C-alpha cells in the first residue's frame, strides 16, 4: 500500500505543484470573469478541484505515453514507471480512477458543460502522444490547458460569449510560450531520442518566438479589456504582468538551462498577477 501511495504521489507530481498553478490561474480567470467577480462557492470549488484532478490525470497519461523514453532523458529517468515503483497496469488504473473523479465533479454542473468536458478529455489524453508526430505538442497542451475557460462560461452563464475566446487565445499563446522554455531544457535529449517540440522547431529563433507569443497573449488580454470597457485595476495588472514578462525574457537571454527551467516555473506569477488585477477590477476595489 505504501508503495502505491508513494507511486501515486510521484506520478501525479503532487510534490511539484507548478503544473497545478499554471492550470489553476487561467481557470479562475474565466470563473471570476463569468461571475463578474463573485463566483458561487460550489462552482469555484468544483473547478479548483477539477484542476487538481485533471492535472494529475495528465501527468499519469504523460508518463504512460513516455515510459519507454523517459529513461533516456536526464530530468525524467527516475519517474515511477522507469524506476519500477509502479507498473503500467497500475498507472492505467490510476488514470481511469482520476477520470472517474473528474466526471463526478463535472456532473455537478450543467449538461452542456459535461459535453465540453469530453473535448477536454480528448485534448488532455492526446497531448503526450503528439510529440511523436508534430513539432507543435505545446499547441495541443495550450488547447487542453485553456479548455476550462469555455467550460467555466458555460457552467456559469449557459453560453460562451465571443470575447471569452480572447481569453482562450491569450492562455493558449501563454502556454506555448512557457512550455517552449520548458522544452528548451530537454532539447538536446529530445533530439537524440527523436521527440519533437516547439523548442526544436524554433531553433535559434526560440527566444524571439517566445517573446512574440507573450506579445500575442498581452494583445488578446488588452483587446478583452477594451471590449469589456475594463478600467484602472485591469490595465494596471496587465502592465505589471508585462513587466514581469520582461524580467523573464531578460533572465533567459543566455539560454542557460537552469534559468530557463526557473523562469518556466516563475510563469505562474504571470497568471496570478492577471487574476488579481481582473478580480480587483470586477469588485471595484
Image: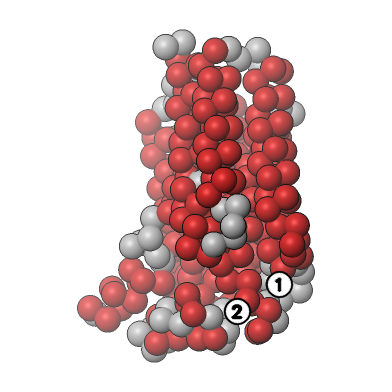
**Answer yes or no: do the residues labelled 1 and 2 have beta carbons within 8 Å?**
no
Q: Position of residue 165 (x, y in %)?
A: 71, 35
Q: Residue at x 76, y 69 (%)?
A: 134
User: What is the secondary structure assignment of the residue under circle 1?
Assistant: loop
**Residue at image coords 39%, 89%:** 84
Badge 1 is on which residue? 196
Res. 232 image quadrant:
top right
Query: Considering depth in this image, is 26 or 271 the residue closer to the camera?
Result: 271
Q: Is residue 56 visible?
A: yes
Q: Which residue matches tag 2?
A: 189
Q: Position of residue 29 (x, y in %)?
A: 53, 33
Q: Nearer the viewer, residue 83 or 31?
A: 83
Comes first in the chain, label 1 or label 2:
2
Measure the alpha-carbon separation of dots 1 and 2.
11 Å
- The quarter of the picture where residue 185 lies is bottom right
Q: Residues within 10 Å of mark 2 (few under 14, many from 20)?
A: some
**Percent position of residue 222, x then y:** 67, 25
| Residue at left offset 64%, top offset 50% | 177
Foreground disc of the pair 1, 2: 2
Q: Which mark is residue 28?
A: none
Q: Badge 1 local density, few (<14 within 10 Å), some, or many (20+)? A: many
Residue 16 or residue 7, whichever sits in front: 16
Q: Position of residue 54 (x, y in %)?
A: 49, 57
Name the residue at 43% across, 54% down: 18
Quick check: can you spot residue 121?
no
181 or 196: nearer the eye?
181
Q: Vertically, is 177 above or below 201?
A: above
- The N terminus lies in which quarter of the figure? bottom left
Which residue ends up furthest to the front in the rendered image?
A: 254
Q: Determine whether the residue tagged by mark 2 lies in a helix, strand or loop.
A: helix
Amino acid at each position: 500500500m505504501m508503495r502505491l501511495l508513494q507511486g501515486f504521489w510521484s506520478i501525479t507530481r503532487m510534490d511539484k505543484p507548478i503544473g497545478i498553478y499554471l492550470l489553476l490561474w487561467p481557470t479562475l480567470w474565466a470563473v471570476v470573469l463569468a461571475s463578474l467577480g463573485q463566483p458561487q462557492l460550489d462552482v469555484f470549488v468544483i473547478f479548483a478541484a477539477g484542476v487538481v484532478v485533471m492535472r494529475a490525470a495528465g501527468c499519469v497519461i504523460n508518463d504512460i505515453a513516455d515510459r519507454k523514453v523517459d529513461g533516456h532523458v536526464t530530468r525524467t529517468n527516475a519517474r515511477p514507471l522507469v524506476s519500477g515503483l509502479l507498473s503500467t497496469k497500475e498507472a492505467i488504473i490510476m488514470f481511469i480512477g482520476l477520470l472517474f473523479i473528474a466526471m463526478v465533479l463535472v456532473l455537478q454542473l450543467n449538461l452542456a458543460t459535461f459535453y465540453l468536458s469530453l473535448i477536454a478529455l480528448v485534448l488532455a489524453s492526446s497531448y503526450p502522444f503528439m510529440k511523436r508526430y508534430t513539432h507543435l505538442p505545446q499547441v495541443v497542451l495550450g488547447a487542453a490547458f485553456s479548455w476550462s475557460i469555455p467550460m467555466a462560461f458555460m457552467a456559469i452563464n449557459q453560453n460562451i460569449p465571443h470575447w471569452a475566446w480572447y481569453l482562450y487565445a491569450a492562455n493558449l499563446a501563454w502556454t506555448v510560450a512557457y512550455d517552449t522554455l520548458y522544452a528548451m531544457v530537454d532539447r538536446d535529449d529530445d533530439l537524440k531520442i527523436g521527440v519533437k517540440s516547439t523548442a526544436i522547431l524554433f531553433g535559434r529563433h526560440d527566444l524571439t518566438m517566445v517573446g512574440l507569443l507573450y506579445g500575442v497573449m498581452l494583445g488578446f488580454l488588452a483587446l478583452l479589456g477594451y471590449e469589456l470597457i475594463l478600467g484602472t485595476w485591469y490595465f494596471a495588472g496587465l502592465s505589471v504582468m508585462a513587466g514581469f514578462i520582461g524580467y523573464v525574457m531578460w533572465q533567459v537571454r543566455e539560454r542557460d538551462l537552469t534559468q530557463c527551467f526557473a523562469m518556466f516555473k516563475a510563469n505562474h506569477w504571470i497568471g496570478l498577477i492577471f487574476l488579481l488585477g481582473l478580480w480587483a477590477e470586477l469588485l471595484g476595489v
